[in-house]
Structure formats: C-alpha cells, structure tokens
Amino acid sequence: MYVVVVYDTLAARNPAILRLCRQYLHHVQRSVFEGELSSAQMRRFRHQVEGVIDAGYDSVLVFSFPPGTSPERQEWGIAQPAPSDIL
C-alpha cells in the first residue's frame, strides 16, 4: 500500500523518528515521508514508531492508500484537530 507519513514530535525525538522513517520511506520534506509498504512492513513500522514517540505529546499521521480502496487516515499519538476553515 502507498502511505504518506507526517509527524510532529518533541525536538529531542526528531532525530530518532527521522532515522526510523528513512528506513522505510522516501523523505519528501522536513517531517513528511511517502512510499510503498507491505502489510508486514506497516506493522513493524508502527511498532517501532510507537516505541519512539510519547503518545501523550507526539503525533504521527499516516495516510494509507490500499489498492482499490478509499484513502484511510490513522492517527498515532495525540490527535490533532482537523482545520475548521481552509483559505
């Protein structure tokens, strides 16, 4: 499946999450990554991410696009509110 990962973590954890994301995905910009992951890779990636972040402070958004289905949004860690207005 194709995924887009966006993270917002405490500055002290940024290097660890950056290295982890680079192991699995292509670095697009600052805290944005994208690429193809198998189901097994996605499970390993999630397990490793959850081992690095503070789920009460950090946020990792994963947008997954499985073949033949609608996009799915997952939030790991603290939820971020959706924008109420877009210019």
Image (tube, rainbow, N blue to C red):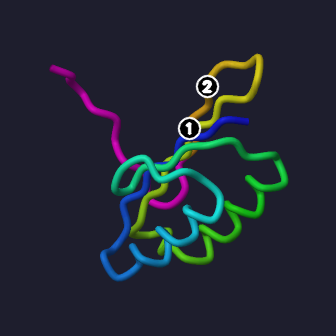
Q: Are marks 1 and 2 in contact (CB under 8 Å)?
A: yes
Displayed quadrant of residue 48: bottom right
How many marks the image carries: the answer is 2
Which residue is label 2 attached to?
Answer: 71
Which stretch did the figure color magenta?
Answer: 75-87
Q: Residue at x 34, y 35 (%)?
A: 82
Q: Quadrant of the N terminus?
A: top right
* Residue 36 position within the rendered picture, expressed as x and y whole percent measured from the top left: 69, 41
Looking at this view, name the residue that lies furthest to the bottom.
12
State the mark number for residue 63: 1
Up-down relation of residue 3 to residue 54 (above or below): above
What secondary structure is the stretch in magenta mostly built from? loop
Tell me the element at label 2.
Answer: loop
Up-down relation of residue 61 to residue 86 (above or below): below
Callout 2 amino acid: Pro
How busy is the neighbourhood of tag 1: few (under 14 within 10 Å), some, or many (20 plus)?
A: some
Q: Decide if residue 26 is on the left or right side of residue 47.
A: left
Q: Decide if residue 29 is on the left or right side of residue 52.
A: left
Looking at this view, name the residue that lies furthest to the right.
40
Q: CA distance from mark 1 to mark 2?
A: 7 Å
How busy is the neighbourhood of tag 2: few (under 14 within 10 Å), some, or many (20 plus)?
A: few
Q: Residue at x 77, y 57 (%)?
A: 43
Up-down relation of residue 72 to residue 15 (above or below): above
Q: Is residue 84 part of the magenta span, yes or no?
A: yes
